[in-house]
Image: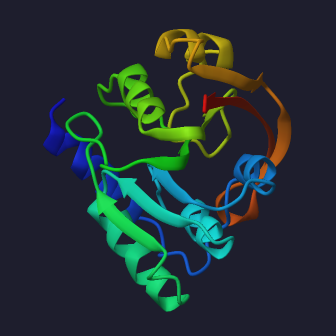
Amino acid sequence: MNTTDAVMFWDDVYAARPAATDPRPNARLTEVVASLPPGDALDLGCGAGGDALWLARQGWHVTAADISAVAVERLAALARAHGLGGRVTAVRHDLRDSFPQGGFELICAHYLHTPFDLDRAAVLRSAAHALRPDGRLLIVDHGSTAPWSWNQDPDVRYPTPHEVAAGIDLDPATWTVERADAPRRIATGPGGRTAEVTDHVLLIRRGA
């Protein structure tokens, strides 16, 4: 499948949803980042923008990237509406072809899964190299299938956090795995539906 297919797919996904007015941040983001001093953050696959807006409210300057122009344009408008336009820069990137420029204290990749070809390890390796000294890369993946997930393949296998870390293949002399676990939580999906899900959480810090 080519780039046009991927763009159309994700534009259709977001266009089919009502535009969010105050999207919620991901639970693992608030859990991990609440104690960190704010700086420059990059949100990969920003979607509706709940993470980017939450980070901006905590004092971060956020570059929010997504393949979908629909998602990016909605987030830019939403940031302005909430008085956060000066702290959120929404940009369209197909991570197969380009990566946002700059250095960051925090890079988040929440549920960066796609049915299209993507060398995810290469993208996450680029993210690790874009960290400033003492910066952190937070990767949160699905560890189970929610009832409302777009991917309902019963044979899907979710790599463990340690497998993801091994695939990124970072030099342990420079990057340290600070967390690699699989906590469970009750998630709320479309229409208020709830279900227990498993997250695969990987937190990597770049050395000083």
Q: Give x and y (percent) for residue 130.
A: 42, 38
Q: Residue furthest front?
A: 208
Residue at left offset 44%, top offset 49% = 45
Which quarter of the figure has residue 175?
A: top right
- Which image quadrant is residue 193 in? bottom right
Tell me which corner region of the image, top left, top right, bottom left or bottom right, holds residue 172. Answer: top right
**Residue 125 relative to residue 184: left or right:** left
Identify which residue is drawn at 38% across, 64% down: 71
Out of 91 and 7, give the one closest to the viewer. 91
Where, quadrant-wise, is the N terminus in this rendering?
top left
Residue occupying image coordinates x 68% and y 55%:
189
Colour scheme employed for the rendering of this structure: rainbow
Q: Quadrant of the C terminus?
A: top right
* Up-down relation of residue 35 to residue 24 (above or below): above
Given residues 165 and 96, the one toward you in this image is 165
- What number of labels is visible? 0
Q: Can you say whether 17 is above or below 154 in the image?
A: below
Q: Residue at x 71, y 31 (%)?
A: 201
Q: Position of residue 123 (x, y in %)?
A: 37, 30
On screen, 78 above or below 111?
A: below
Residue 55, position in %: x, y?
A: 62, 65
The residue closer to the viewer here, 155 or 176, is: 176
Residue 13 visible in the displayed image: no
- Whether residue 189 is visible here, answered yes or no, is yes
Point out residue 95 in the picture as x, y percentages from the top left corner.
30, 39
